[in-house]
């Protein structure tokens, strides 16, 4: 398997080299809004420890990350009055992965509303900030 490369965009976000619209942070985990949301409230949860994806992740890192995925899924469901929550995680290009730092997508879903395409249009940053605030208030 290809080794983890810390030149990826999420490693740059973790180092503060590029901005993100932050939703949650603790010693082990960062959550921020996806810049190309597939639905309003689409966010990403990443461990601070680098791994390419779930295939090379340390199980102890996963054990710290999953409760945060759950916490944010519950908050996003409440914040967007969603009927359901889609949690997605892709491993390697064949599975749709485009950024090679482990991440979990959390996407609020409403009955009858289709998802926008993966890696589609870049959203307005002020809208992403407003959505992040709604999720933070539900935490
Ligand atoms: P994937 O690797 O296929 O699971 O998807 C990577 C996700 O990262 C996509 O949904 C992109 O919209 C999102 N993304 C790419 N660059 C950024 C960025 N700078 N900040 C936030 N999200 C991003």
Image (spheres, rainbow, N blue to C red):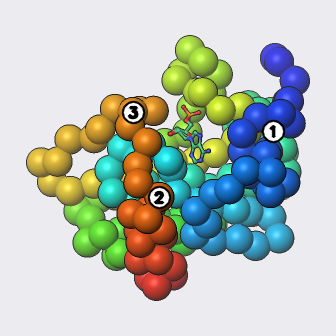
| Image quadrant in which you'd find residue 135 | bottom left
- Residue 51 is marked as 1
Estimate the x, y position of residue 57 in percent, counting from the top left. Answer: 79, 40
Neighbours of disc 2 within 10 Å: few (<14), some (14-19), many (20+): few
Please state which of residues 1 and 42 is positioned toward the viewer in this rendering.
42
Estimate the x, y position of residue 105 in percent, counting from the top left. Answer: 51, 48
Can you tell me whether the CB of the residue at mark 3 lies under 8 Å from the nearest atom of ligand 1?
Answer: yes
Which of disc 3 and disc 2 is earlier in sequence? 3
Disc 2 secondary structure class: helix
Disc 1 secondary structure class: loop
Which residue is at a point 71% across and 31% down the rendered structure image?
100
Q: Badges 3 and 1: C-beta atoms under 8 Å apart?
A: no
- Residue 120 is marked as 3
Residues under labels 1 and 2: Cα distance?
28 Å
Q: Is residue 74 left or right of residue 70?
A: left
Q: Is residue 12 left or right of residue 46?
A: right
Q: Nearer the viewer, mark 1 or mark 2?
A: 2
Q: Is residue 39 above or below residue 93?
A: below
Q: Which residue is mark 2?
A: 125
Estimate the x, y position of residue 94 in percent, counting from the top left. Answer: 56, 14
Q: Is residue 127 above or below residue 55?
A: below
Q: Quadrant holding ligand 1?
A: top right
Please state which of residues 36 and 80 is positioned toward the viewer in this rendering.
36
């Amino acid at each position: 398997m290809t080794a983890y490369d810390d030149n990826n965009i999420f490693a740059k976000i973790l180092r503060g080299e590029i901005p993100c619209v932050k939703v949650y942070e603790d010693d082990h985990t960062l959550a921020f809004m996806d810049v190309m949301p597939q639905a309003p409230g689409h966010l990403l949860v990443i461990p601070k420890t680098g791994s390419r994806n779930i295939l090379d992740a340390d199980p102890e890192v996963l054990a710290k990350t999953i409760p945060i995925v759950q916490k944010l899924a519950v908050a996003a469901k409440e914040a967007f009055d969603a009927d359901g929550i889609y949690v997605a995680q892709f491993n390697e290009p064949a599975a749709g992965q485009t950024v090679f730092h482990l991440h979990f997508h959390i996407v609020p879903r409403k009955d009858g509303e289709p998802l926008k395409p993966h890696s589609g249009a870049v959203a307005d940053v002020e809208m992403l900030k407003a959505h992040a605030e709604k999720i933070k208030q539900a935490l």
